[in-house]
Amino acid sequence: MTFAGKLFPPGAFCLSNFYHKHGIVRVAIPATFTHYIYHLKFHFMQTDFITGELSRWISNFNDNKALPFVTTSALIKLEDLEKFVAEIKKQQADSVRIYFLRLQTGETLPALALPLALPAGDIPKGCKWHEASSAFTQATIAMVPAKNFTIESDLTFAADDIVLNNMITTLMPGIPEKGTGLNPPSPTKAVTMVGTK
């Protein structure tokens, strides 16, 4: 994730944008912390999540099966997928697990810091999280590295998620300061989307 702006003097604060259900929230962050994050230069939604945080979002999906999925599709750039695969190969991954998850409505996701609102104060269309209920957002996916891939006797697939120091490398749709990557339309009517009529 990349925070726009420059390094401030020690003790100073800078403002960064975080998504909230009611708009863009400006949050003051110590300059030293911002400097650290700025140099991580995450340009896509690959990041390391605390396993408990990711587990909570997965439970938001699994424990609310009656909610509408809402999400029609998601887009991830091939370049970003290749970077993710290169990173998890370093962790000796031999497979990828795909989880379904939901955020709570109004929950901020710092890894998807978004640009300022439009002049009218609205959130750009591609930055909006649709709501499946008053409590939870639309569904999205998270890809995580796994190892020890096997096919069991009953033809179920099995593998162990790779967790390093209670953190797990994750790739999700979306690009910081660009949008969520969910429910993407075709940019041209000349291109047919298989999942649409």
Image: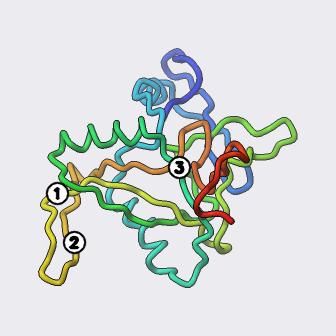
At label 3, which amino acid type do we have?
A: Leu
> Which badge, 3 or 1, is on the more N-terminal residue?
3
At 71% from the left and 43% from the top, the residue drawn is: 188
Compared across the picture, whether 135 is left or right of 160 comes to right
CA distance separating discs 2 and 3: 25 Å
Q: Position of residue 196 (x, y in %)?
A: 65, 63
The C terminus, quarter of image = bottom right
Which residue is label 2 attached to? 157
Q: Position of residue 134 (x, y in %)?
A: 68, 73
Residue holding disc 3 = 75
* Distance between mark 3 and mark 1 Cα atoms: 25 Å
Please give the name of the residue rendered at 12% of the width and 81% of the height, measured from the top-left corner. 153
**Which residue is painted at 54% across and 40% down in the image?**
175
Circle 3: element type = loop
- Left or right of 107, for residue 111: left
Q: Is residue 143 above or below residue 44?
A: below
Residue designated by label 1: 147
Name, please, the residue furthest toward the right: 120
- Say which mark, if any, is on residue 13: none
Lower sequence index among marks 1 and 2: 1
Mark 3 or 1: the one toward you: 3
Q: Quadrant of residue 70?
A: bottom right
Residue visible at 51% across and 22% down? 11
Figure quadrant of residue 47:
top left
Name the residue type under label 1: Lys
Would you call the spot at circle 3 few (<14 residues within 10 Å), some (14-19), or many (20 or more)? some
Q: Categorize mark 1 by other alpha carbons within 10 Å: few (<14), some (14-19), many (20+).
A: some
**Which kind of residue does numbered mark 2 sit on?**
Phe
Q: 80 or 120, which lies in front?
A: 80
Q: Secondary structure at mark 1?
A: strand
Q: Secondary structure at mark 2?
A: strand
